[in-house]
Image (tube, helix red, strand yellow):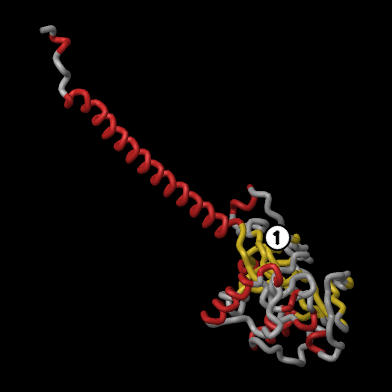
């Protein structure tokens, strides 16, 4: 009988597909493992970039008070450029940073309580002589043109509207009153080196350098770049929520009323 007439064992005919099936499974496992590692690496890369951007480039802030009305409103969410002014080190000379100028809006650590962030407009830079006469700001003897300034009350507060006043003790710290007495000359406050005199655009309702003093250059975080979102508060809302429960409630309210409470005409507006 010819050997070619013998039946081929089933183990041989079925073995090859079985080996290929196992090999495909291992290839799939390796492929899934590679995809998982790639996804984790991509996620970690995204997180690292996000942390870098938040730490060194831009940071988000919310406006909690009306001190900058009508330039910035309560409920405006800002992206702040943290790179525009530099860090004051040797590397600044190699980067396209610029000096803080009179009229700039800046975000900074509140000098009295550095954990708090304030946003105000720079009125006096180092060496400037600042005074207010009946709400009009004078710098180095020249009246400032301030189309952004907002007034809501009559001129009936001598310390607020005719600054500096050495006969009145400002409210926040006794140190500021002593500093005033040392730096006032001919009725003008001299801004010392490395410090800035700032005020809110809402001049009658702004807790600013008139009351607590200068902002050190090291406290300045950056300059607001963009209002990326603006939201109206609830009509019954009078204070910023502080407890976890209140914050969760306000978050849920914002999500469920997103289109109704968003100020679309302010969203994605440049700050100047």
**What percent of the width, then of the height, locates residue 264?**
75, 65
Residue 263 figure quarter: bottom right
Visible in this render: residue 193? no
Left or right placement of residue 3 versus residue 141 in this view = left
Q: Name the element at disc 1.
A: strand
Name the residue rendered at 71%, 82% in the picture.
Answer: 235
Residue 136 figure quarter: bottom right
Q: Residue most toward the left?
A: 1
Nearer to us in this view, 61 or 176? 61
Left or right placement of residue 120 versus residue 2 in this view = right
**What percent of the width, then of the height, locates residue 156?**
85, 91
Task: Locate the C terminus and report the quarter of the image it occupies.
Answer: bottom right
Visible in this render: residue 29? yes
Task: Locate the N terminus and report the quarter of the image it occupies.
Answer: top left
Nearer to us in this view, 37 or 272? 37
Name the residue rendered at 70%, 60% in the picture.
Answer: 225
Nearer to us in this view, 147 or 91? 147
Nearer to us in this view, 40 or 54? 40
Q: Which residue is mark 1?
A: 225
**What percent of the width, then of the height, locates residue 78?**
67, 65
């Amino acid at each position: 009988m010819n050997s070619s007439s013998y039946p081929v064992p089933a183990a041989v005919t079925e073995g090859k597909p079985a080996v290929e099936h196992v090999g495909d499974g291992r290839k799939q496992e390796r492929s899934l493992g590679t995809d998982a590692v790639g996804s984790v690496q991509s996620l970690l890369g995204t997180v690292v970039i996000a942390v870098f951007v938040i730490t060194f480039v831009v940071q988000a802030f919310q406006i909690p008070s009306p001190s900058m009305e009508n330039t910035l409103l309560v409920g405006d969410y800002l992206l702040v450029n943290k790179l525009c002014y530099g860090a004051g080190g040797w590397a600044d000379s190699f980067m396209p940073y610029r000096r803080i100028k009179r009229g700039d809006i800046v975000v900074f650590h509140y000098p009295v309580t550095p954990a708090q962030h304030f946003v105000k407009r720079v009125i006096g830079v180092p060496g400037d002589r600042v005074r207010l006469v009946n709400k009009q700001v004078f710098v180095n003897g020249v009246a400032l043109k301030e189309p952004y300034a907002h007034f809501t009350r009559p001129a009936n507060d001598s310390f607020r509207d005719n600054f500096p006043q050495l006969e009145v003790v400002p409210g926040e710290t006794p140190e500021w009153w002593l500093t005033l007495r040392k730096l006032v000359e001919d009725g003008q406050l001299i801004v010392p080196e490395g410090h800035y005199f700032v005020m809110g655009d809402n001049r009658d309702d702004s807790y600013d350098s008139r009351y607590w003093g200068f902002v050190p250059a090291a406290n300045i975080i950056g300059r607001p770049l963009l209002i990326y979102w603006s939201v109206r508060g609830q009509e019954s809302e009078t204070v910023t929520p502080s407890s976890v429960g209140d914050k969760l409630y306000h978050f849920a309210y914002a999500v469920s009323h997103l289109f109704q409470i968003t100020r679309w005409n302010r969203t994605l507006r440049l700050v100047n």
